[in-house]
Image (spheres, rainbow, N blue to C red):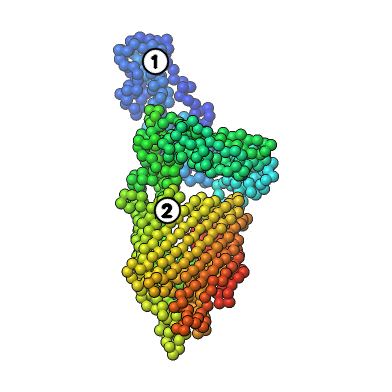
Amino acid sequence: MQVRRARSAGLVSGLAILLGATALTAPGTARAQAVAQQQGVVQRISVSGNERIEQSTILSYLPIAVGDTVDPARIDLALKSLFRTDLFSDVKVGLTGGNLTIQVVENPIINRVVFEGNSGLKEDKLRDEITVRPRGIFTRAKVQADIQRIIELYRRSGRISAVVTPKIIELPQKRVDLIFEIDEGKKSGVLGVNFLGNSEFSDNDLRDVIVTQESAWYRFFSSNANYDPDRLEYDKEQLRKHYRNRGFYDFRVISGVAELSPSRNGFAVTYSLEEGPQYKFGKISVETELKKLDTALLTQLVPIQSGEIYEDQRIESATDALTFAAGAAGFASVDVRPRYVADPKTRLVDVVFQVNEGPRVYVNRIDIVGNNQTLDSVIRRELNLVEGDAYNRALVDRSKNNLRALGFFKDVNIEETPTGNPDRTDLLVKVEEQATGELTFSAGYSSVDQLMIDIGVTQRNFRGRGQDARARVSWGSYRKQVDLSFTEPRFLGRNLRAGVDVYYFVYDLSEYSSYKTTTLGTNFRVGFPLTADSFMTMRYVLRDDDVQVPDYYCDPTQQQVSQTLCDQRGRYTTSLIGYQVTLDRRNSPIRPSRGFFISASQDFAGLGGDVKYIRNEIEGGWYHGFNKDFVLSLSGSGGYISGWGDDAVRINDRFYKGGNSFRGFKVAGIGPRDTSNGRSDALGGEVFAIGSAELTVPTFIPQQYGIRASVFTDIGTLGKLDDSVKLDTDGNVIPGIYDDLSLRASAGLSIFWRSPMGPIRFDFSHILQREDYDRVETFRFSQTTKF
């Protein structure tokens, strides 16, 4: 914004007064002075020089009244009191013959605050940073402080040569326009990031550890490609964590130096490292003087074994585990301190955890700020502490994680605030809310569904009560689906997650099995935690299924499909109850790199309705990350379904595998198949078992492009049909029906791309083992929900 400079007699000519380092001095160096040699009794007080400020206001700040006896110290105190108000640029106080005279020069009022020369930073961002405001009092100290804030803002954005020059234009009635003239200078990029002294990890490996990035044309959205001295300090800490969590106990960063290039267009950053040898954990022990705690039991709870590679984060996990254990034994306030004894000869680090009772501190009050939409009760029920509880740091950390897991907040912080009482503390829960409602519309194409249109409305914090409400319509060549869902996370005020789903979908399987199924149903579910890492869900399902096979396919005169498939036609009602138990110890549910999970479920159909079966399924996975780029995962799943009460398992209730569940084979590509009448119809199986091994590998493509890759191998089987399905009346297998449990196997490469149209997965597969009647595919692309 440009300001027109008035050059008339009332204004400062040009850009007027330059507020440089010498002009912006503290009030104490102004020419204000006190007449120190005078003293006596004050008989009158007179004020002069004030234009806007009332005399009564000035007198209210004055620590002297008529009748007081004053001396040079009292006059000096009065002078300082008036200066502290920030209302005056100059003050004189004197006593003459009992008359106390006060002469003031008022600070001007700011009319406008203007920024000139700013193109790299928006004006709104600059205004949020400064403290001076229109209609506020102008003081030189405030302006000088704001200059430093603006320079710091530019420095963080990579412009370390930015210069800010403050200028004012005087206006009538003691008003001024304040102008910040900004010379932003050039962006200081990072021309190179180099490492000295590293032998265990390559420069490329370490560049992935730090946040500072080398400047490149494709990083125009990244602020980490600009030089920032503070970021260098953060990088040092990241390097230390990286090495210390991989056994390098003696590691240290000798220096981190940034050198300006001769052309002054950027910096070359060099980190000098001393790696040292790799250590392992030696003897692990626990010491405590608390009689209620069993040191042998506490030692068993430490998640560290002798001989394992030394890791700092394992020490932190052990500290938290001991803190929780002591809390469970009644010690809400404990002090767990690890003591290290490193032996360079054996390259072992002995760790002794000293557990002592700390001073008891109780929670006095819990305040919550920043929640404009979310109700206080929703936040408080996720806290593991209430007013009156003994303060426990581990419980505070767990409360913070609980709030973050809700997905309602951008940031969560819990701070201790002193109360003035040493055994009491207040907790301030600061949350920053984020949008929890989503309106999505997407259109895409995949090798399975072909053209797809998806419209959805989701509110994960409905009415600020933490409730989850969803509505979705999906329309594709393979499936058409409408579903509504509502979840109450605290049903009946208890730790019960209850919900209801209503859905209608149509699966057109004519390409795979010559039939189409239409389903209308509802689910009622309730879930609850068993432990900190395990969860159980119980459900009741009531649905109506209509299996449709075209009449001309089943016409005896020109039957085109087997009688087995024709016998499955009709509408059937399913009423079932089921449960699922999950143990999840992964470090991330989306992209885990450590830990495992296992899930088992069972459904019992036959509580009314027309269908009777028992279905059992189990699924699990184990993950281990070797570094940021390589993550090995081993996963498996299995299932078995059987009818009861002389009821055979219907075709739409059997298991179908292929596509995303078994790469290299089409949807329903493996398992029992009917090849009679020149067709190839999948019949599904009653038993399956599939195992996968997958290794995430680096792509050497910049991370912002959102591309990941992994190599995989899948092996498994699917089969077993009821005799009533595959045998004729004489007990012989119907010609053209194949059913066996032979192994299938495939291997290949998967590429995941977070595209502008949504997450997409490409699978390139090679078949290692198959049956002649299986349906295979060597390339497949599809949408995916996990990335």
Amino acid at dot 1: Ile
Q: Is residue 23 left or right of residue 645?
A: right
Report the number of numbered marks. 2
Residue 241 or 35: which is nearer the viewer?
241
**Residue drawn at the location 58% of the way across and 60% of the way down:** 693
Q: Is residue 632 left or right of residue 506?
A: right
Q: Is residue 521 above or below residue 426?
A: below
In 3D space, how far apart are the residues under numbered discs 1 and 2 (Cα atoms)?
A: 74 Å
Secondary element type, mark 1: helix
Q: Can residue 222 be seen?
A: yes
Q: x%, y% of residue 522?
A: 35, 65
Q: Is residue 601 above or below residue 388?
A: below
Secondary element type, mark 2: strand
Q: Which mark is residue 75?
A: 1
Amino acid at dot 2: Phe
Q: Can residue 4 be seen?
A: no
Q: Which mark is residue 535?
A: 2
Instruction: Point out the frontmost of discs 1 and 2.
Output: 2
Q: x%, y% of residue 735?
A: 51, 83
